[in-house]
Every structure is written in structure tokens, then in C-alpha cells.
Amino acid sequence: MRYRRSNIAGATYFFTVAAADRCSSLLVDRIDALRSAVAYVKRRHPFAIDAFVVLPDHLHAVWTLPPGDADFSTRWALIKATFSRALPAVESASASRLRKGERGLWQRRFWEHLIRNDDDLARHVDYVHFNPVRHGYVRRASEWPHSSIHRYIRSGLLPEDWGGDVQKGDGSFGEP
């Protein structure tokens, strides 16, 4: 069976993209290369970043695509490729990846979810921002440096201590 992705131009989507090695800290270790890759692709294939968080081995994002454009897959492929080309080739790759000219830094696929309404958007943005707390990296979302929560705090949309009083592990906060 072939997986069918959403294809709605100008829509807002939630994404989870993971490193191939889920025990690595590659994404935060090379955060500047990842930021450059995102900026490079965003200049050539515009999209709005509604929320973004980078964790050691995966990232979550909420994007809004321009009117008439539904091609988030190309954007992710270009981000992954641009990031990979910025790093020395020291990782191991399977024979299948080598045959296809792939590096092996990223999982091949990614998860996407079409945002359906304002409540769905709010839940997913909260999920993005709370994810470092959920994984136990920090006690408060604002303590994680690689998150769009800082933009939300600067603009007054969230207080500095947002998410700080939620108990980790209760499974009820921000789950999309």
C-alpha cells in the first residue's frame, strides 16, 4: 500500500523529523548547520515557521505553506540534504542508502499532520514548545535554547514561565 500524504496548498502542517541514530545528539551539536539549511531552503521555497523545536535526535515544526503551494516534501528533502552536505561523511550507511546516494543521517520518512482548525494549531504549537520538558531535557520550556518559544515570549504571546508548572509524564499536556 502506498502512503498518501495531505496535499492542501497554503495549509498549515505539523511535522516530526528524526535523525537516523535516535541515540545521537547530532541536531543540537550541529544546530548552526541545521539553522543554515532551514534558512537556505526557506529563501528558495518560502514557508512560514509557526513553531519549531530541535531536540538532540529529532525535531518538531509547524509550518504554513504559501497559497497555491502544498510541497512540504521537497522542502524537507532539501533541508535534510543541505544539512547533510554541511557535515563530514563519517557516519555508517546501509548498502541500500549507499546505492541511492544517501548519507544515513536522517530517517527516510517524516510524520506530517494537517492542522484542521485553531484549536488543533494551538495544541500542536504547545506540543512543539513543551517537548523538551516532556523528554526531560529541561524543567521549563523557556530553558531549552533551540525553540521558537523564545519568539512567543518576546512577542508577549507566552509568559517566561509557561509550561513550568505542568508535571512531566502525566501524558495530558500538549499531546496532539
Image: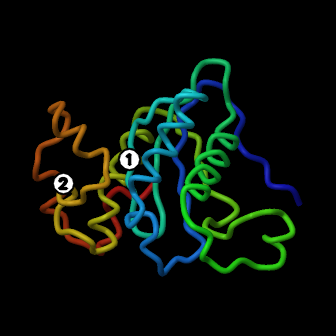
Q: Which residue is mark 1?
A: 123
**Residue placed most toward the observer, 63 or 76:** 76
Quadrant where the N terminus sits is: bottom right
Q: Amino acid at mark 2?
A: Ser
Is residue 3 shown left or right of residue 155? Answer: right
Q: Amino acid at mark 1?
A: Arg
Q: Which residue is mark 2?
A: 142
Residue that appears at 38% across and 64% down? 28
Residue that appears at 74% across and 64% down? 102
**Residue placed most toward the observer, 105 or 9:** 105
Instruction: Decide: is 42 above or below 100.
Output: above
Residues packed near mark 1 inside 10 Å, few (<14), some (14 to 19) or many (20 plus): some
Quadrant where the C terminus sits is: bottom left
Residues packed near mark 2 inside 10 Å, few (<14), some (14 to 19) or many (20 plus): many
Q: Position of residue 160 (x, y in %)?
A: 11, 48
Q: Position of residue 86 (x, y in %)?
A: 55, 56
